[in-house]
Image: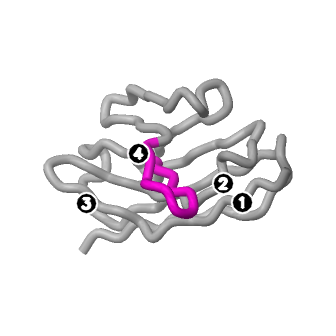
Amino acid sequence: QVQLVESGGGLVPAGGSLRLSCVASMFGFDLYGTRWYRQAPGKQRLLVASINLNGTVAYADSVKDRFVISRDNAKNSLYLQMSSLKPEDTGVYFCNVYRNVEFWGQGTQVTVSS
């Protein structure tokens, strides 16, 4: 059974930084693509950043130059370094692992105060 556990969320003032982590309990993590999503209150879940199994990264325009996604396959881990945080970055951040199926974590809350 695949489990994804996110951590690192919290309350931070605008301009601050946070580092999110996601640890995957699964075999073959290095064969899966990985993503971070954000869901703001009352809104749909949106893709924030992705890094595929080859290490190719992509970002939503709203977080480019502020967020950095990375992964450590030896630790079955995915990370999201968030800097220069804005109130609009507030939401629950979800880790996603995908190949021909996809798996989700339970999410970690990030709140950026103005």
**Predominant secondary structure in magenta?**
strand
Q: Earlier in the sequence, mark 2 or mark 4?
A: 4
Could you say where residue 44 lies in the image, as x and y percent from the top left? 43, 54
Q: Nearer the viewer, residue 16 or 89?
A: 89
Amino acid, disc 2: Thr
Contact check, label 1 and label 2, Cβ < 8 Å: yes
Q: Quadrant of the N terminus?
A: bottom left
Q: Residue at x 75, y 43 (%)?
A: 86
Residue at the disc numbered 4: 35
Residue at the disc numbered 2: 90
What is the distance, in whole Å, between disc 4 and disc 1 at their CAs?
Answer: 20 Å
Mark 3 is surrounded, within 10 Å at the Cα level, by few (under 14), some (14 to 19) or many (20 or more) other residues, namely few
Could you say where residue 15 lies in the image, as x and y percent from the top left? 83, 41
Amino acid, disc 4: Arg
Could you say where residue 100 lies in the image, as x and y percent from the top left? 14, 49
Dot 3: element:
loop
Tell me if 11 is positioned left or right of 100 in this view.
Answer: right
Instruction: Using the image, tell me which numbered label, if any, was put on residue 27.
Output: 3
Displayed quadrant of residue 54: top left
Q: Earlier in the sequence, mark 3 or mark 4?
A: 3
What is the distance, in whole Å, between disc 3 and disc 4 at their CAs?
Answer: 17 Å
Span colored in magenta: 35-47
What is the distance, in whole Å, between disc 2 and disc 4 at their CAs?
Answer: 17 Å
Contact check, label 2 and label 4, Cβ < 8 Å: no
Amino acid, disc 1: Thr
Mark 4 is surrounded, within 10 Å at the Cα level, by few (under 14), some (14 to 19) or many (20 or more) other residues, namely many
Q: Earlier in the sequence, mark 1 or mark 3?
A: 3
Q: Residue at x 74, y 42 (%)?
A: 85
Could you say where residue 16 lies in the image, as x and y percent from the top left? 82, 45
